[in-house]
Amino acid sequence: MPTLNFVLPHWLYWSGLLIFPLFAMYMARRQRARAAGPRIYPFLAYLFWLTAGFAGMHRFYLRSAWGFVFIPVFLAILHTNGVYRDNREFVSKARAEYETTHHALESAQRATGEGQQERLAKARRDQAQAQSTLDSAEGELNRWDRITRLLAIALGVMLLVDAALIPRVIRKQRAREAEWAAKAPPPAPPPPEVHEAGTGEDPTMTMHTRLTDAIDAVSTWTGEFVAYWGMIAVFFYYYEVTARYIFNSPTNWVHESMFLMFGMQYMIAGAYAYRDDSHVRVDVVYAKLSRRNKAIADIISALFFYIFVLTMLWTGSRFALDAINVQESWRYRSAPS
């Protein structure tokens, strides 16, 4: 299998965090506006084809049994990749053994005195055996590499053929669904929508001013914006698993980039959760307080929150000033030779 040596550049990481949520919000609103439209969408079909087509997921999305054809090929690639990894480790050990016998032979050739010929003969036999083992291991490794590449080519051809067939399959499936809808009984009325927004215990939730409404609007928009970052994590970790177990190319950037993203998401979405009173609270005592006492308890607990925030700002500013003083840059620059 070919290796994946892609490393996420900084500009793509930050632009993705900014652009992807806007695109996702647009698609979600468009979907809500077309709630009565078709249930199969070409965009989603090609998205499944691009990200999980090797397992036939695009065919399953299109309700086509041809998706099962992809599964044996995909499982065969997983098996051959596992065997290839084992053989690569065996080749590494055989090469190390050969290097050991080679050094032993050179040492025996330089040696003098009694038993030198026997030692030299033994070193030559050991090297010949190590060479034979190494040749056999490399031959087995190359054989499994060819098998894996042939399976990958076969899967690639299947995906290319399906890329051209997807529009046709969508038209057929839509026609079937139209026939099924004409024969089906009328649907039952949908249940009433219930909006759950936190515990509703915060006494300030019913208070509205121009300032608080503006703050709530910003908190709502930013909270919905960063909520779509969770989808980015799905794609990134999906790429990590695919690269690791199919292409034998584990990444060194997925975990770190998602760790930083979730940290920012936690900080930005905190205001959204606070607006709806959705933060986790041990309210054994709080729930029994009056409206006035709840407000007093919130003021006291807010003091500890601001202590934490001020500490974070002070510590963060020190780190930022240190980075500015040493002219630290996010761009990697090699050391001068």
Image: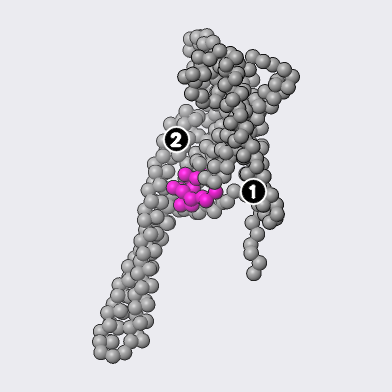
Circle 2 sits on which residue?
Answer: 67
Q: Residues within 10 Å of mark 2 (few under 14, many from 20)?
A: some
Image point (47%, 41%), residue name: 54
Q: Residues within 10 Å of mark 1 (few under 14, many from 20)?
A: few
- Foreground pick, 76 / 169: 76
Q: Quick check: 123 above or below 163? A: below
Image point (39%, 41%), residue name: 72
- Percent across and percent down for residue 272 are 61, 26
Q: Secondary structure at mark 2?
A: helix
Q: Position of residue 223 (x, y in %)?
A: 62, 29
| N-term mark: 1 or 2 | 2
Asked if residue 246 is among those painted magenta in the image, a careful observer would answer yes
**Amino acid under label 2?**
Gly
User: What segment is highlighted magenta in the picture?
Assistant: 239-253
Residue occupying the point 66% across, 67% down: 336
Q: Is residue 226 magenta?
A: no
Q: Which numbered dot is residue 319?
A: 1
Q: Amino acid at mark 1?
A: Phe
Are the residues flagged by discs 1 and 2 in contact, CB closer than 8 Å? no
